[in-house]
Image (tube, rainbow, N blue to C red):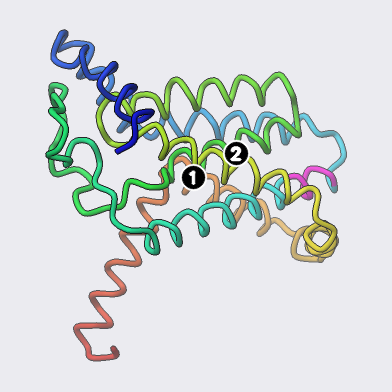
Amino acid sequence: MNDFDTSIILFLNQYSQVSTVFDKFVVMLSSNHLLKGGVITALLWYCLFNVKDDSLRKIAFIFTIFSTVIAMSITRLLAYMLPLRLRPIHETSIDFILPYDLDTKILDGWNSMPSDHATLFFTLSMCLYFLSKKIGIFAFLYTLFFICLPRVYLGLHYPSDIFVGAIIGILVAYLSVSLPFLIFINKKISDSSFCKSSIFYTISYLFTYQIADMFDSSRELFKAAHLFFKSVGLY
């Protein structure tokens, strides 16, 4: 662990177990999907329906889907490819004081680098910034202080995990509205008959629901499908 991570982790950790109420509040804040994805997706829908032109609204939403899927795919790929980095709560080389009410088994065995929370919500914050600078800045600050900082305090991530995740999210969102071939694909999709049907908004709702849910429901379904196919000998 580098000096940057160590200094911030130990600075925040000095307040651990000082207040039972505070620790339990931070644990709740970190685990409550409504206070994380619920807030950000609500801001997204608010911004989208402030766009008067229906075609521009569809284009903006497709850009958001593109950015989110690409950014999260990069993050998950890096998490599998990079050497396993234990989270502060699992790292024995530092004297990390566990906050009250924190489950020590949480995310055990998962790579800490990079942070998928930071990637997801900084991607969405950048997309919101393109739609509304004021709301985008609010989303950036909310993501930093109410989504990412609690995870550092609880020892679920190092600051550098958050930083790398944020860079991935912001960069992917920026490139999604800058690269000509992505703009071309987006325009083709938005002009298709599919985007003119009610199914488009149905899928849009389900996608933002999964964002708010941190894709937990989808992961559970994939795990169940994996176990089923394995049990019947399909692989």
Characterize the magenta stretch by its predominant secondary structure.
Answer: helix
Task: Tell me the residue that label 2 is attached to.
Answer: 124
Q: Quadrant of residue 132?
A: top right
Expressed as whole percent of the image width and height from the top left, the position of residue 101 reads 13, 25
The amino acid sitting under disc 2 is Leu
Viewer-nearest residue: 200 or 132:
132
At x 71%, y 19%, the residue is 134
Left or right: where does residue 69 sit relative to residue 183? left
The amino acid sitting under disc 1 is Ile
Expressed as whole percent of the image width and height from the top left, the position of residue 20 reads 14, 12
Task: Tell me the residue that label 1 is attached to.
Answer: 211
Q: Quadrant of residue 81?
A: bottom left
At x 36%, y 53%, the residue is 217
| CA distance separating discs 2 and 1 | 10 Å
Expressed as whole percent of the image width and height from the top left, the position of residue 161 reads 41, 40
Viewer-nearest residue: 70 or 222:
70
Image height of 87 relative to 16, above or below: below
Left or right: where does residue 2 sit relative to residue 103? right
Please tell me which of labels 2 and 1 falls first in the chain.
2
Asked if the residues shown at circle 2 and circle 1 are in contact, with their CB atoms under 8 angstroms apart, the answer is yes
**Which quadrant is the N terminus positioned in?**
top left
Q: Which residues are magenta?
A: 56-60
Secondary element at tag 1: helix
